[in-house]
Image: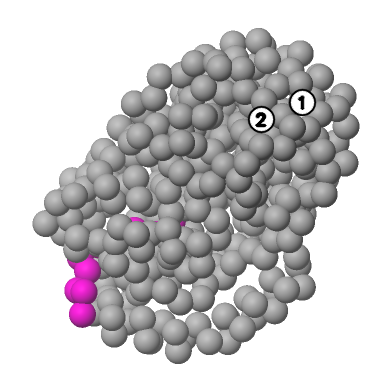
């Protein structure tokens, strides 16, 4: 049995879902998580979690709120050393042998201080492990994420990067390895079907025209993430439920969501085209939907007053999207766990002895 310190970015639930899939694959090991916000709340249901503030993205009305984010993160930066010292006491009592981090700040720094190996397992480091082909108008946003990945979340020993888009990337070498996405175990056992409805998921406050857009769809729409329940016209609002959500996901005709890498990967694994509305100012989400469209798996819009014409064009392309999805690889669990196995056996995910 190994003792593993696991840092998880707490914005949203995607990082927590991915990290939980890893931890549950290794029931023989003991985990201590470090997280914050929604991530800490989600992980605490299954594991012990140490919670403290961390660099985060502030989102309101489907866009990054730059000034509030800078204020919060400035407070974090001033207090980071004191928080690390307080965290170190708890971590030393746990006495970890390995560290894993999913876009979390403290754990890789603590691992360096304690002299133990740390593996980064996330999607965001796609911007430092590869050179993505993106429009010129997005380069300023790309550079912002690149600098964050390189200089803020860069203290791990090696980087295992999951991505549903491997085509079109110029890969770098060194300490980076890119593999298809990791999927939670319940998704792997699902049999996809088409029951005719649309699945909508938005976990943050979304743009004003989002619900009117869903009402314009000439299909039933099952809506998650809006803190509501009950039927309104063609919309059926549902409370959070992993089992219910996955059943609705496997049975939908297509998915409408933000730019979450986890949800897009799960939808594509089940053969579902995706219409995405990335959060404005969040480059990682833009990169996801850029490749979603480029590879012909779906489409996206940054027009948050989107008209029904967008829906008509998207639905007219559903057969093409489904055909393209059939040629993709969206589950990298075997590669991920093989790399983690090597890391836990020898402190490195490489094949070298």
Q: What residue would you read off at disc 1?
A: 217
Q: Is residue 141 above or below residue 221?
A: below
Tell me, yes or no, if residue 320 can be seen here: yes
Q: What residue would you read off at disc 2?
A: 221
The magenta segment is: 93-102
The answer to which of 108 and 320 lies nearer the viewer is 320
Q: Is residue 281 left or right of residue 49?
A: right
Quadrant where the N terminus sits is bottom left
The answer to which of 150 and 277 lies nearer the viewer is 277
**Residue 138 in the image: x percent, y percent?**
77, 46
**Residue 74 in the image: x percent, y percent?**
64, 81
Find the residue positioned furthest to the left: 1
Q: Is residue 116 above or below residue 236?
A: below
Q: Is residue 78 left or right of residue 187?
A: right
Q: Are marks 2 and 1 in contact (CB under 8 Å)?
A: yes
Look at the image and say whether residue 129 sits in the magenta stretch. Answer: no
- Say the numbered circle drawn on residue 27: none
Q: In the image, what residue occupies the spot 42% across and 58% down?
A: 42
Instruction: Specify the quadrant of the image occupied by residue 213.
Output: top right
Q: Is residue 221 left or right of residue 7?
A: right
At mark 2, the secondary structure is strand
Tell me, yes or no, if residue 123 can be seen here: no
């Amino acid at each position: 049995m190994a003792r593993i310190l696991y840092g998880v970015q707490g914005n949203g639930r995607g990082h927590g879902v991915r990290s939980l899939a890893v931890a549950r694959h290794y029931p023989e090991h003991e985990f201590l998580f470090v997280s914050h916000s929604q991530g800490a709340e989600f992980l605490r249901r299954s594991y012990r979690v140490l919670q403290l503030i961390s660099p985060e993205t502030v989102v309101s009305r489907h866009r990054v709120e730059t000034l509030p984010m800078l204020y919060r993160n400035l407070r974090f930066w001033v207090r980071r050393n004191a928080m690390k010292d307080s965290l170190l006491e708890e971590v030393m009592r746990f006495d970890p042998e390995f560290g894993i981090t999913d876009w979390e700040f403290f754990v890789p720094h603590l691992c360096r201080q304690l002299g133990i190996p740390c593996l980064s397992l996330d999607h965001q480091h796609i911007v430092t492990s590869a050179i993505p082909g993106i429009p010129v108008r997005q380069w300023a946003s790309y550079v912002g994420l690149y600098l964050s990945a390189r200089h803020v979340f860069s203290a791990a020993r090696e980087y295992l990067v999951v991505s549903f888009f491997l085509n079109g990337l110029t890969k770098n070498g060194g300490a980076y390895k890119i593999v298809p996405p990791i999927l939670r175990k319940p998704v792997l056992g699902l049999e996809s079907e088409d029951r005719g409805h649309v699945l909508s998921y938005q976990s943050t406050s979304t743009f004003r025209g989002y619900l009117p857009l869903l009402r314009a769809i000439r299909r039933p729409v099952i809506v998650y993430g809006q803190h509501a329940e009950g039927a309104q016209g063609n919309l059926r609002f549902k409370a959070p439920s992993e089992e219910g959500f996955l059943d609705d996901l496997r049975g939908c005709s297509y998915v409408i969501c933000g730019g979450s890498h986890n949800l897009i990967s799960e939808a594509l694994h089940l053969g579902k085209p995706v219409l995405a509305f990335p959060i404005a100012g969040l480059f990682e989400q833009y990169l996801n939907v850029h490749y979603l469209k480029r590879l012909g798996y779906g489409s996206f819009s940054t027009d948050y007053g989107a008209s029904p014409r967008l829906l008509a064009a998207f639905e007219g392309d559903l057969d093409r999207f489904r055909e393209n999805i059939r040629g993709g690889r969206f589950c990298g669990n075997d590669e991920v766990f093989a790399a983690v196995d090597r890391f836990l056996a020898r402190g490195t995910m490489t094949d070298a002895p």
